[in-house]
Image: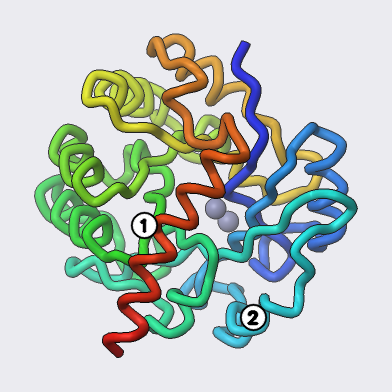
């Protein structure tokens, strides 16, 4: 049984359609054996989502809450075919973790498979992006092998999203394909709960069942080790800092 120690995709009340505070999320993490909790509220393009100031001010949160390490992040919205995100570079570069993905009503609505693939690849090539969320969403069909190829090159990870089984029907087959191809190509995946309520933090049951079925082990999953997560963030940070200097 694979044990995961970090939840890198979660939402607080700041997202507008999630129901717990940061402290409640940290308590939920602790309860479920999670040592690293990333707070990744939706980007400002999400209806009801937080203002940009929310992200700039995340620095006021402590490094740890009751022993749980807090990672300050965002789930940014891709809003066009160029893979552009709904937060400016200065804000994104100062966050610990940038997730990015497609959300209906947040700028980029489903287009053809070719267009979706191009938009996702553009987002992957953005050095500020760390993880692409729910790439298995059947509403936004993409060419999985092409996406994985670029992701491998850019050291951007694809996510297997535990909530997809509830909120994005038809995700299972695609996620299975992503997991299998990732394993073959020797690229790690990240598992996220996409928790919108504190009791869901660290609950990866369905995603874990799927990756195990695809033949993945702990070594194939980023968030199976605290050190692995911290190293990933640190490596990506170097790239972000270079980008800030250029600006
Ligand atoms: Zn949400
Ligand atoms: Zn989410």
Task: Compare residues 55 and 236 and report the one nearer the observer.
Answer: 236
- Residue at 86% across / 59% down in the picture? 23
Horizontal arrangement in the rendering, residue 171 relative to residue 43 (left or right): left
- Under circle 1, the secondary element is loop
Alpha carbon distance from label 1 to label 2: 21 Å
Task: Identify the residue position indicated by label 2 in the image.
Answer: 54
Q: Is residue 109 above or below residue 131?
A: below
Which quadrant holds the C terminus? bottom left
Q: Say which residue label 1 marks.
A: 102
Q: Position of residue 234 (x, y in %)?
A: 48, 57
Vertical side of 160 occupied by 234: above or below: below
The number of callouts visible is 2
Query: Can see residue 16?
Result: yes
Q: Is residue 143 left or right of residue 201?
A: left
Residue plotted at (32% across, 76% down)? 242
Residue at the (86%, 54%) spot, across then down: 24
Say if 112 sits above or below 15 in the image: above
| Extreme residue toward the left, this view | 114
Q: Quadrant of the N terminus?
A: top right
């Amino acid at each position: 049984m694979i044990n995961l120690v970090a939840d890198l995709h979660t939402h607080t009340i700041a997202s507008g359609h999630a129901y717990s505070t940061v402290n409640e999320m940290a308590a939920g993490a602790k309860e479920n054996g999670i040592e690293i909790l990333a707070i990744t509220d939706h980007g400002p393009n999400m209806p009801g989502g937080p203002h940009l100031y929310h992200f700039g001010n995340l620095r006021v949160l402590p490094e740890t809450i009751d022993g749980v390490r807090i990672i300050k992040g965002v789930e940014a919205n891709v809003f066009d075919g160029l893979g552009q995100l709904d937060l400016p570079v200065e804000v994104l570069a100062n966050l610990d973790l940038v997730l990015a993905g497609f959300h209906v009503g947040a700028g980029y609505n489903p287009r053809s498979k070719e267009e979706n693939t191009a938009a996702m690849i553009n987002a992957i090539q953005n050095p500020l992006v760390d993880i692409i969320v729910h790439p298995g969403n059947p509403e936004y069909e993409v060419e999985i092998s092409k996406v994985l190829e670029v992701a491998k090159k850019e050291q951007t990870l694809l996510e297997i999203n535990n909530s997809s089984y509830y909120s994005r029907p038809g995700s299972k087959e695609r996620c299975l394909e992503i997991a299998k191809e990732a394993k073959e190509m020797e690229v790690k995946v990240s598992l996220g709960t996409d928790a919108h309520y504190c009791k869901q933090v660290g609950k990866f049951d369905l995603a874990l069942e799927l990756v195990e079925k695809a033949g993945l082990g702990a070594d194939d999953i980023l968030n199976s080790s605290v050190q692995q997560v911290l190293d990933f963030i640190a490596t990506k940070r170097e790239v972000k800092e270079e980008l800030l200097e250029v600006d």
